[in-house]
Structure formats: structure tokens, C-alpha cells
Image: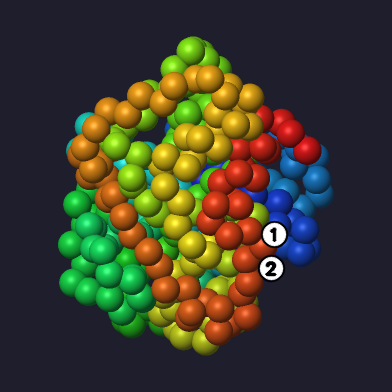
Amino acid sequence: MRSLVTGGAGFIGSHLCEALLGRGDEVWCLDNFYLGREENICHLRGRERFHSHNADILNRNELDLVFAASRPEIVYHLAANSDISVGNKDRSLDLRLNFLTTIEVLEAMQRHGAKQVFFASTSAVFGDNRDLLREETGPLQPVSFYGASKLSAEAYLSVFAHNFGYRVWILRFPNVVGERCTHGAVFDFIGRLQKDPSRLDVLGDGSQMKPYIYVEDLVRAILTVCERAPEQLAVYHVAGEGLTSVREIAEMVLEEMQLHETPIIYGGGKIGWVGDVPYFNYDSSKIKALGFTHRWDSTAAVRFAVQRILGKD
């Protein structure tokens, strides 16, 4: 396959590029390096089937040049602002980087004859919903600009599937952990402790509880959905088994960093920031019916991610 990965130098995108190359695809990585990092893909440079473009999706001329060069059979659209708290501080960020980038990618596909697109969505489209979340759960009432922008993008993808014959795969990610991450509880806790090992400040009261998935499992889920889902507009959930609390994550990080006497200082309250969802849980039975199995459950995924970020074997 000729595959174009937007956000390909990012946390998840760089891992996806590796997997696509591993199965024999010709891979084009498009990134403006807002969250992406050169070090995430430097080991891929020089490989015969890997091509990297520093380009801005919102610059139509730059985007057309990448599409003309890559002539993709499938676009994996991962480019986005994925930091919910930052998006709530700058209310134009998610509009531009999550929603408008999706529109530009869909329009570029129309201009260049590409008809297959994978979209990275999120549990945030549901808002603060304590039910077991199934693909058909509703109403969808996001409480963050990130969730709203992803939900809006999902709606446009649906229109392109129904009206223009696009093949669309949507996978709603849970919390993703692993090396090359740029934010999130694991990343933040490790960073804070490396700067000041005398205390660990935690937003909220530590009771926030969500499913986590290790990035390698997530990439396999992406490929499973794109290879096996029969629907023209396919919407799936994926998560590691079980839920993990922020308190458990903080304790795991301290244990792995051997900071057994360091106190955890909780900020209080049920949420970490405006737009945070303190609890959600996924029903992953639909993707399991495609044959997907995860290697790590939620808590094991977090511990393994901590170890990998710290450079442990």
C-alpha cells in the first residue's frame, strides 16, 4: 500500500509509520512538528520506502505537493492537538488542528483521487458519561473543545462516506501510553519528579479512573480495523482490559523511579482541569469480534510505559 500518515512524527504516528513499513508499505510521513519530533523518525530516515515531509496541512499548496508526491491509497489522519488542557486555554487550537485539518485532508483526497481514510478519534466525544461506552452510545455531549472538534470531524467524515463513496475507519482511542509521548499523567509525573524528586504534585484527588492502552497495542488495533472492518463507515472502540486510577499511576511512577519516600500532594477535586472527564469505560467487544487481542491490560500497559520511558528493558 501507498500510505500517508499525517502527524507521522508524533507519538502515535511514528509508531504507526514503523508498523506500516514493517508490513511492506510505502510510507509518507507528513508533520509540521508542532507536537511531532525529529527524533521520533530519525531512525526511519534512509529506509527505501520512507518519505518525510515537513508541511502544514492548513497550507493547501504544501498539502497538495505532499499528495501529488505520495499518491496515497490510504490516509491515516492522526495530525491533531491532543493536549486537552492546552486546547481549553487557546480555544482556536482544536478548531484549527483537529477539525479544519480534517476538512483539508478530505478535500485534498477529493482533489487527488484518494478514497480511503483512517481517523484517530477519542472517548472525549462522549463527554462526562459514566455508562459503559459502546459505539452507538448517545447522546454525544463533549465537555472539552478537543472532544467537540473530534466529534465535528467525525460528522464530516460520515458525510464524505455517504455522499462521495469514501471508505472511512474511525477508532476512538482511550488514554494511550508509551515512549515518545508528549503529555499525559505518566509523562507529566516522570517529568515533575526528574525536576524535583522531593514531592509529586497531582491534579485532582487521584480518584480519576480510565482505561489505558500501550501504543503498540493501539497500532495493532488501527491495522486490525483497517484490514478487517467490513463497514464503509466503520466506528470502533479499543482499550486495555480494566481501569487504572491516577493514584495508581502516581504510585507506580514513584516505585519505578525508586522514590519510595516521596510524598504525593493531591490538588483536590474530582477533575484535573476544565474539560477533564474523571471516569469513562469502553465496551471493546466490537473490535474483539474482528480478532483483535491486546497484549497488556490497562494497568500493565501503564507500568510497561513507565519502564520504557525511563529506559528500562
Q: How is the image coloured?
A: rainbow
Which of the two labelled residues, at mark 1 and mark 2, occupies the earlier sequence position?
Answer: 2
> Does the image show residue 22?
yes
> Does the image show residue 113?
no
Query: In this picture, is 211 found above or below 251?
Result: below
Q: Quadrant of the N terminus?
A: bottom right
Residue at 49%, 40% in the rendered image: 249
- Residue 281: x and y in percent read 37, 64
Residue at 23%, 58% in the rendered image: 127
Question: What element does badge 1 sit on?
Answer: helix
290 sits left or right of 212 in the view: right
Q: CB of mark 1 within 8 Å of CB of mark 2?
A: yes
Q: In this figure, which residue is indicated by the disc labeled 2?
A: 1
- Residue 225: x and y in percent read 55, 74
Q: Quadrant of the C terminus?
A: top right
Query: In this picture, is 130 found above or below 63?
Result: below
| Of the pair 196 and 146, the residue shown nearer to us | 196
Question: What element does badge 2 sit on?
Answer: loop
- The amino acid pointed to by label 2 is Met
Q: In this figure, which residue is indicated by the disc labeled 1?
A: 20
- The amino acid pointed to by label 1 is Leu
